[in-house]
Image (spheres, rainbow, N blue to C red):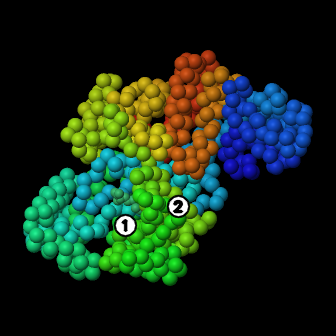
Amino acid sequence: MASVTSLSDSVHQRLAAALSAALPQAGSADPLLRRSDRADFQANGILALAKKEKANPRELATQVVSRVESGELIKDVEVSGPGFLNITVTDRAITENLAVRHADGERLGVPLKENAGITVVDYAQPNVAKEMHVGHLRSAVIGDALRGMLDFTGEQTIGRHHIGDWGTQFGMLIQYLFEHPGELAPAADVDGQQAMSNLNRVYKASRALFDADEEFKERARKRVVALQSGDKETLELWQQFVDESKVYFYSVFEKLDMEIRDEEIVGESAYNEGMPETARLLEETGVAVRSEGALVVFFDEIRGKDDQPVPLIVQKADGGFGYAASDLTAIRNRVFDLRATTLLYVVDVRQSLHFKMVFETARRAGWLSEHVTAHNMGYGTVLGADGKPFKTREGETVRLEDLLDEAVQRAAEVVREKAQDLTEDEIQERAAQVGIGAVKYADLSTSPNRDYKFDLDQMVSLNGDTSVYLQYAYARIQSILRKAGETKPVAHPELELAPAERALGLHLDAFGDTVFEAAAEYAPHKLAAYLYQLASLFTTFYDKCPVLKAETQEQIENRLFLCDVTARTLHRGMALLGIRTPERL
Ligand code: ARG
């Protein structure tokens, strides 16, 4: 948290600064300020300070109270318990703070962080010539939300979609295409669905041939060698698979309402050229050693069956490079060329051992350090209603598109039921926003490292912690603002606030602090929880405090103002998570 207060500081930050200044050793102790039920805030930090100073905590607390300036910010401060401070802030401070946020438009008065770095986010990494399935959902959704949050704090993010576009499996595919030209249409001529069905057809046919025909198998093997040695014709055919797959990827990402940039699709193959250099550097520095012809890295603490050490294979005995070499080379590129200060990987927790070894290798090589760190946000599995990994009735993995289509369909039922004056087109548009939002929110509101159940009924429910509930809160506010007609939202700091207004106001004021905390901890669920609470506090406010029928014109304007700040905060917060907020529902 910034130590200098400025207008965009939250009430919480201003209060923390005021308390620090009033402590005997200004700045040396954290006042440990928290929101509290008894007053607006409680400060617990005096206990620790008293212990350090060998002072009586209640006396110290009393001293602080006498020094703290009440006035603009603090309405009341009192000592409680063994030496806590209970603090109530003025209504004026709350309204004035929100007025600054209201006037600031998009950023809601949230400052940019001071020492921003560059974070490379590795997420949304499907595999070429393969269908995307439910397993690809979380990486895309979590990665996109983390980028939104990090960007908002001022961090510069660079996306990397490390797609699986290289490996021996391409020998079979390319050889088949070589022998059956024209099976893939030019990428420009197909839509996502056609692209995938072409790829599926080629995959199945080539697989069948590969399994049945020894001679084809041999030709496919030779094709792998040709691919690796950069044979021009082979590379052209390979490129066709990549291009056709991209058409398909883009169509799925569009359905997911997610922007993917072509220059950020940098797959495994992009690191081919650098791999021999990676191997050379690791061998020269002794980080990797030759073992049975292969180049490997050992780790004391990583052991498999029979307590045998499990090595990371940088280069196979036949000279070939694999997944690890491409990731190690990608690290060099991201650190030295992209100048990243943080590498973030949003990859299934089942790959966590791979990343542990890759990161440790890079650390030993000096590519990672205390200044350049790497983290894998290993996320949990999407489970079906039965609590087992999500499968179709036939026991197959669920296609991502099917899952998204079903969510949108369910959402359409909910929207239609509530729709009063919506046309069919509008219903479909809302259904997409509600359905995709529901899928994203269900994912993001769970801590990433935990599994969660994919339960569409619950996801599109209007009651409870769902995106639809938040979207309705937003739409309801828009409807209030429309009904207000000529009466505009205006802040009136001189007005006294009702308890429900204060609770809503203080929560609104904490938006920036919450985003910063959630971004720093890579915890989108903290932002989701904040937004849910915001919608709940709004509901209470709306129950208790008439808006358009408030007593005075000033009160109507001030309540409209609270409505408007709430709507903007909901809109911004949801947008950071990648979720739309329709104006009407
Ligand atoms: N394409 C891989 C898969 O589907 C995920 C890639 C993760 N990123 C990385 N840098 N290894 O399993």
Q: Secondary structure at mark 2?
A: loop
Circle 1 residues within 10 Å: few <14, some 14–19, many ≥20 = some
Residue at the image point whose x is 54% and y is 40% from the top? 526
The mark closer to the camera, 1 or 2, is: 2
Asked if the residue at label 2 sits under 8 Å from ligand 1, the reply is: no
Circle 2 residues within 10 Å: few <14, some 14–19, many ≥20 = few
Name the amino acid type tagged 1: Tyr
Residue at the image point whose x is 82% and y is 38% from the top? 46
Q: Which mark is residue 301?
A: 2
Looking at the image, which residue sits at the far front? 306
Query: Residue 34 at x, y = what percent?
Result: 69, 35
Name the amino acid type tagged 2: Glu
Asked if the residue at label 1 sits under 8 Å from ligand 1, the reply is: yes
Vertical order, 491 against 21 (above or below): above
Of residues 71 and 34, the one nearer the viewer is 34
Q: Which mark is residue 190?
A: none
